[in-house]
Image (spheres, rainbow, N blue to C red):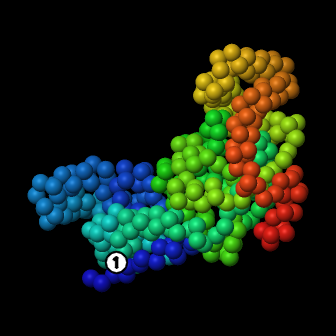
């Protein structure tokens, strides 16, 4: 049976083509592609049984076992789930790990049911290899401008006003610091890489020669920027956002206190949400204790707890500015100040929000 194959990975990635991933759930959870949905041919247990059979008795016996495990009502339900998805997404494409038996069988069953679909030649493994190769050569396709500035300068807020940008922290689902954990878990490393590749390639395809990214360390939480791409960023010009301390304190308050508290209380309820937020913040303070020193850490935690007590008892949030300023002055600023001194030859421009935006506009960055 000669059914359609595709290996046009660039189009699949750029067009956000709906993808049916027929791998087992345990494989999907380790990483998949943007716009993919897991509608497995086999459950984890069925896949494990077939895998054992393959090792012990060979491919033919493993295929026979697979057909015995997935037949009748089970087969009908899985084919129906695929057909339902295809009816909503006629341009969908399916894949398994290597583009072998699982995707071939799924495609054949769909054909028999009157649903036509292409499958990815080489499967997940070939698509993944394409993305990794793109990271190695992507530096030849665009020039980064790295947006820097002290913590609380509002770099992410400014980035959202620039169309020719990629928000690394949003993709990693982490604010890129000891206090950067979000309420939901980060994506897997593989999922982060896939979304990053897609975001950059869409910018390149749109004609962007220069792309603005935020100044980050290689690790954003537990996710890592691919080394070749990170090296490209670190060799690129810096544009520094200079913002007064008072405004930075307000930005951090909105991020670490106001927004985070709302997220936690929405998820857990008012009382429990505030308690979970407090424990999260204390854990974050604990993560920087060694760098702060025991005495300074204890003072900062005491200031934080005093501010929270006043908020709970009196509804006043003004005290939070005290520990936020101390956190910026004693922890974040010395580290970033040292980094800027080490990279001062890379600084191309510096200014406030409107000056930086005007600079980008002069370079035809929209």
Q: Nearer the viewer, residue 20 or 325?
A: 325
Residue 122 visible in image:
yes
Residue 178, by quadrant, is: top right
Q: Nearer the viewer, residue 262 or 74?
A: 262
Expressed as whole percent of the image width and height from the top left, the position of residue 67 reads 21, 63
Q: Dot 1 corresponds to which residue?
A: 111
Question: In this picture, is 179 found above or below 162?
Answer: above
Residue 150, by quadrant, is: top right
Residue at the (55%, 63%) spot, across then down = 197
Q: Residues within 10 Å of mark 1 (few under 14, many from 20)?
A: some
Residue at the (76%, 33%) spot, across then down = 328
Query: How many numbered markers are drawn?
Result: 1
Q: Residue furthest bottom?
A: 2
Expressed as whole percent of the image width and height from the top left, the position of residue 137 reads 52, 69
Q: Which part of the image, by quadrant, shows the N terminus?
A: bottom left
Secondary structure of residue under mark 1: helix
Residue at the (62%, 75%) spot, across then down = 205
Expressed as whole percent of the image width and height from the top left, the position of residue 318 reads 86, 26
Question: In this picture, is 244 found above or below 345?
Answer: above
Residue at the (39%, 73%) spot, across then down = 120
């Amino acid at each position: 049976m000669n059914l359609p194959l595709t290996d046009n990975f660039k189009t699949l990635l750029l067009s956000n083509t709906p993808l049916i991933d027929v791998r087992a759930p345990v494989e999907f959870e380790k990483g998949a592609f943007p716009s993919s949905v897991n509608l497995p041919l086999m459950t984890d247990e069925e896949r494990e049984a077939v895998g054992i059979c393959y090792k012990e008795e060979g491919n033919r016996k493993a295929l026979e076992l697979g057909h015995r495990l997935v037949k009748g009502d089970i087969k009908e339900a899985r084919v129906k789930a695929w057909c339902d998805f295809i009816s909503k997404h006629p341009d969908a494409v399916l894949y398994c790990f290597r583009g072998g038996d699982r995707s071939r069988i799924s495609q054949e069953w769909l054909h028999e049911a009157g649903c036509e679909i292409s499958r990815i030649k080489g499967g997940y493994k070939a698509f993944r290899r394409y993305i990794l190769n793109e990271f190695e050569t992507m530096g030849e396709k665009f020039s980064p401008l790295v947006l820097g500035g002290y913590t609380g300068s509002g770099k992410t807020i400014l980035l959202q006003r620039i169309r020719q940008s990629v928000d690394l922290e949003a993709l990693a689902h982490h604010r890129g610091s000891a206090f950067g954990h979000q309420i939901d878990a980060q994506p897997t490393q593989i999922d982060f890489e896939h979304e990053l590749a897609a975001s950059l390639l869409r910018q390149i395809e749109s004609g962007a020669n220069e792309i603005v990214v935020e100044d980050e360390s290689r690790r954003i939480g537990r996710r890592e920027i691919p080394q070749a791409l990170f090296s490209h960023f670190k060799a690129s010009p810096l544009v520094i956002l200079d913002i007064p301390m008072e405004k930075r304190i307000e930005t951090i308050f909105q991020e670490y206190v106001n927004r985070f508290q709302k997220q936690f209380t929405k998820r857990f309820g008012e009382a429990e949400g505030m308690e979970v937020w407090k424990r999260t913040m204390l854990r974050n303070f604990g993560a920087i204790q060694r760098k702060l020193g025991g005495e300074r850490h204890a003072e900062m935690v005491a200031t934080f707890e005093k501010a929270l007590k006043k908020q709970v008892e009196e509804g006043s949030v003004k005290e939070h500015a005290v520990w936020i300023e101390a956190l910026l002055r004693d922890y974040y600023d010395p580290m970033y100040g040292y980094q800027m001194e080490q990279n001062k030859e890379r600084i191309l421009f510096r200014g406030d929000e409107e000056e930086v935006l005007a600079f980008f506009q002069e370079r035809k960055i929209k």
